[in-house]
Image (tube, rainbow, N blue to C red):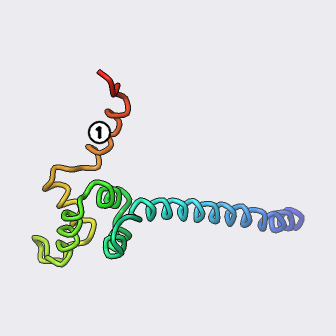
Amino acid sequence: MKKILTVMLSLLPLFSYAEEDQAISQQQQGGMQGTNQQNMCSSLSPNEQQFAMKLNSSNRMMFCNRFSKDIRNQTMQMTKQTDASGKMMTPDQAVEKMAKSKNMTPQQQMQGSQSQSGSCPVQ
């Protein structure tokens, strides 16, 4: 029994190193995704970039790539207003509300890019 316990205790550090390596690689991948997301919004003003960093990834893509400057400004202003329940609107809620009012959805964006890539440019 003592031998089994000793063997188990000697193997324990091996498992913790594997978990630590996995956590580090996940952090690095997350960092790379964050960098890509920041690059996606690099052409925006500093205020717009700061606002974009508060958004989830699909809303950030919508805000940075699909919204015009005027729509971005309107969206940022919406966060200073209250929603139907009297709470301040979050940046994500503002983007979603603006996208809905302009008939823009992430699904349409995905479908549009897929249908364009599969079609022949010369007809």
Return the x and y of residue 49 as percentages of the image width and height: 36, 70
Q: Residue at coordinates 32% horizontally, 33% vertically from top-left? A: 115
Residue 31 shown left or right of residue 101 in the figure: right
Return the x and y of residue 55 as percentages of the image width and height: 34, 66
Pick the front one: 122 or 27: 122
Residue 13 shown left or right of residue 87 in the figure: right
Above or below — where is 4 with respect to 45?
above
- The amino acid marked with disc number 1 is Gly
- Residue located farthest toward the left when viewing the structure as drawn: 84
The residue at which mark 1 appears reads as 112
Q: What is the secondary structure assignment of the residue under circle 1?
A: helix
Q: Residue at coordinates 68% horizontally, 66% vertically from top-left? A: 20
**Image quarter for residue 72?**
bottom left
Q: Residue at coordinates 18% horizontally, 74% vertically from top-left? A: 77
- Residue located farthest toward the front when viewing the structure as drawn: 122
Q: Assess disc 1: are there few (<14), some (14-19) or many (≥20) residues with their C-alpha within 10 Å of its C-alpha.
A: few
Return the x and y of residue 74 as percentages of the image width and height: 17, 68
Return the x and y of residue 54 as percentages of the image width and height: 35, 71
Pick the front one: 87 or 38: 38
Pick the front one: 12 or 4: 12
**Image quarter for residue 123?**
top left
Pick the front one: 13 or 101: 101
Instruction: Name the quadrant of the N terminus.
Output: bottom right
